[in-house]
């Protein structure tokens, strides 16, 4: 795991606004503000062999339930085939105020009795092993804004759906 504070340059903080659904970017033509942020992350971390990136923007609030999961091809997971992403990055690029909403990462075994808790601080970046179980803890007040990126060496179902809907 890598944790960096004050990660994005100022011009990229508050750059990405909330949008619905998971999107796909092949890393080539930039057409969305999110692509600037992904490009910065890729240039910084240099994940090898990526064919593209899934990305989405989450807003969590009081009462939001986020169960334990690992980053995978969600569509294939519905059919019992678990294909993890190759690279995962969580960013908090939007100013927010909240109580709770920790990123909890399993550090021991499947009982999840030992977890590392990471506060969702503005302009923090967390790169984690996509195959590690993690979740967002309960939020007592406010909203948690997160921009999430999964890198893939082989296209996930999201990429195929994106191509079909062009």
Image: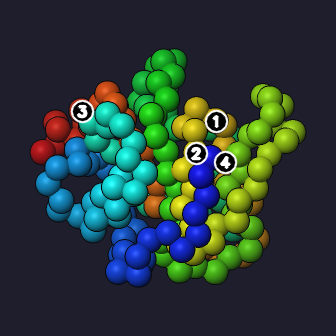
Q: Badge 3 is on which residue?
A: 160
Query: Which dot marks residue 90?
Result: none
Label 2 or label 4, whichever comes before in sequence order: 2
Q: CA distance from mark 1 to mark 4?
A: 10 Å
* Residue density around tag 3, few if under 14, some if 14–19, many if 20 or more, within 10 Å: few
Q: Report the mark closest to the observer, 3 or 2.
A: 2
On screen, residue 96 versus residue 73, left or right, reads right
Q: Are marks 2 and 4 in contact (CB under 8 Å)?
A: no
- Residue 157 is situated, as x and y percent measured from the top left of the image, at 32, 31
- Residue 151 is situated, as x and y percent measured from the top left of the image, at 39, 41
Give the residue furthest to the top.
80
Q: Report the mark closest to the observer, 3 or 1.
A: 1
- Provide the secondary structure element on which disc 4 rests: strand
Residue at 59% across, 52% down? 2
Label 3 or label 2, whichever comes before in sequence order: 2
Q: CA distance from mark 3 to mark 2?
A: 25 Å
Q: Badge 1 is on which residue?
A: 132
Q: Badge 4 is on which residue?
A: 135
Front-most of 76 and 89? 89
- Provide the secondary structure element on which disc 3 rests: helix
Q: Are marks 3 and 1 in contact (CB under 8 Å)?
A: no
Quadrant in the picture for residue 76: top left
Label 3 or label 1, whichever comes before in sequence order: 1
- Residue 94 is situated, as x and y percent measured from the top left of the image, at 49, 75
Q: Are marks 2 and 1 in contact (CB under 8 Å)?
A: yes
Q: Report the mark closest to the observer, 1 or 4.
A: 1
Q: Badge 2 is on which residue?
A: 128
Viewport quadrant of the C terminus:
top left
């Amino acid at each position: 795991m890598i944790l960096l504070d004050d990660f994005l340059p100022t011009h990229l903080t508050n750059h990405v606004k909330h949008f619905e659904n998971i999107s796909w970017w092949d890393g080539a033509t930039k057409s969305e503000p999110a692509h600037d942020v992904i490009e910065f992350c890729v240039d910084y971390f240099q994940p090898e062999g990526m064919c593209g990136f899934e990305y989405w923007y989450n807003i969590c609030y009081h009462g939001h339930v986020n169960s334990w999961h690992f980053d995978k091809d969600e569509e294939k997971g519905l059919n019992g085939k678990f294909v993890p992403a190759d690279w995962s990055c969580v960013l908090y690029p939007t100013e927010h105020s909240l109580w709770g909403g920790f990123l909890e990462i399993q550090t021991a075994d499947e009982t999840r009795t030992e977890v590392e808790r990471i506060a969702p601080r503005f302009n923090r970046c967390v790169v984690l092993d996509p195959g590690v179980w993690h979740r967002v803890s309960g939020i007592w007040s406010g909203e948690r804004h997160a921009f999430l990126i999964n890198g893939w060496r082989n296209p996930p179902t999201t990429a195929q759906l994106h191509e079909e809907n062009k």
